[in-house]
Image (cartoon, grey):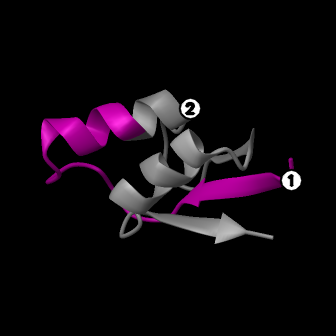
Amino acid sequence: MATIKIKQVRSKIRCPKVQKLTLEALGLKKMNAVVEHEATPSILGMVNKVQHLVAVIK
């Protein structure tokens, strides 16, 4: 599988708790933090849920 880099670009302050937990599950705890994951369907689904808070870096 290919790997993708995910960067948090917006704050999670006014987000619902489910989205905050999704960001933490991805490993994003701070603004501008970058994590690398394999592009599995579960990871891509989590990125899709918080797509307004993150950016995918290729």
- Looking at the image, can residue 36 be seen? yes
Q: Which quadrant of the structure image shows residue 21?
A: top left
What amino acid type is highlighted by mark number 2?
Gly
> Residue 27 shows which numbered tag?
2
Residue 51 placement, left or right of 44: left
Mark 2 falls on what kind of element? loop
Mark 1 falls on what kind of element? loop
Determine crowd level at label 1: few under 14, some 14-19, many 20+ residues with C-alpha closer than 10 A. few
Q: Which quadrant of the structure image shows residue 6?
A: bottom right
Ranked by sequence position, the earlier of labels 2 and 1 is 1
Residue 12 in picture, x, y percent from top left: 29, 50
Do tag 2 and tag 1 residues touch (Cβ < 8 Å)?
no
Q: Look at the picture and state if 58 lies above or below 30.
A: below
Q: 18 or 14, which is in the foreground?
A: 18
Residue 7 on the magenta span: yes
Determine crowd level at label 2: few under 14, some 14-19, many 20+ residues with C-alpha closer than 10 A. some
Q: Which quadrant of the structure image shows residue 23?
A: top left
Residue 10 on the magenta span: yes
Q: Look at the picture and state if 15 lies above or below 54.
A: above
Q: Residue at x 46, y 51 (%)?
A: 45
**Residue hosting label 1:** 2
Residue 16 placement, left or right of 21: left
Query: Rounded to the nearest whole Å, what is the CA distance between mark 2 and mark 1?
Result: 18 Å
Q: Look at the picture and state if 34 lies above or below 29.
A: below
> Residue 28 shows which numbered tag?
none
Labels 2, 1: front one: 1
Residue 33 in picture, x, y percent from top left: 61, 47
Residue 37 placement, left or right of 6: right
Q: Residue at x 53, y 36 (%)?
A: 26
Residue 1 placement, left or right of 25: right
What amino acid type is highlighted by mark number 1?
Ala
* Start-end of magenta stretch: 1-22
